[in-house]
Amino acid sequence: QVQLVESGGGFAQAGGSLRLRCEASGVAVRFTEMGWYRQAPGKQREVVAVIKRGVSTDYADSVKGRFSITRDEFHHSVYLRMTGLKSEDTAVYYCRANFDGNDFWGQGTQVTVSA
């Protein structure tokens, strides 16, 4: 059974930093495409960053140069390091794993950035 648990959200001032963690069980993060998505109030969920089975990563244009996605196989986790936060980064952030042709989602963690 695949389970994803996000943590690390909270409040930050504009220009500040946060690090989100997605702890995975039931999948090996090394061999699984995983990503971070976000959904702001009144908006659709959008991709933020994806890390594929190798070392390849993709980022939304809005976060390039500010956010970084990494994996830690030892701790079965994927992280999203967020720097230079902006008010428009405020959203619920979700972790996703694509495993065996299926998508699995975490429950989300709120990130709020004050201007």
Image (cartoon, rainbow, N blue to C red):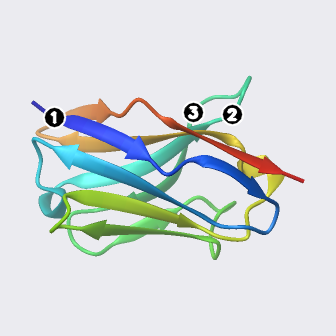
The CA distance from mark 3 to mark 1 is 21 Å
> In x, y percent, where is residue 112?
72, 44
Q: Quadrant of residue 74?
A: bottom left
The CA distance from mark 2 to mark 1 is 25 Å
Residue at 40 percent across and 62 percent down: it is: 79
Q: Are marks 3 and 2 in contact (CB under 8 Å)?
A: no
Q: Secondary structure at mark 2?
A: loop
Please tell me whether mark 3 or mark 1 is closer to you in this view. Answer: 1
> In x, y percent, where is residue 23?
28, 49
Say what amino acid the circle numbered 1 marks. Answer: Val
Q: Residues within 10 Å of mark 2 (few under 14, many from 20)?
A: some
Image quadrant occupied by the N terminus: top left
Image quadrant occupied by the C terminus: bottom right
Question: Circle 2 sits on which residue?
Answer: 40
Q: Which mark is residue 53?
A: none
Q: Quadrant of residue 75?
A: bottom left
* Residue placed most toward the observer, 46 or 11: 11
Q: Is residue 55 left or right of residue 114?
A: left
Residue at 63 percent across and 76 percent down: it is: 65
Question: Circle 3 sits on which residue?
Answer: 45
Q: Residues within 10 Å of mark 3 (few under 14, many from 20)?
A: some
Say what amino acid the circle numbered 2 marks. Answer: Ala
Q: Secondary structure at mark 1?
A: loop
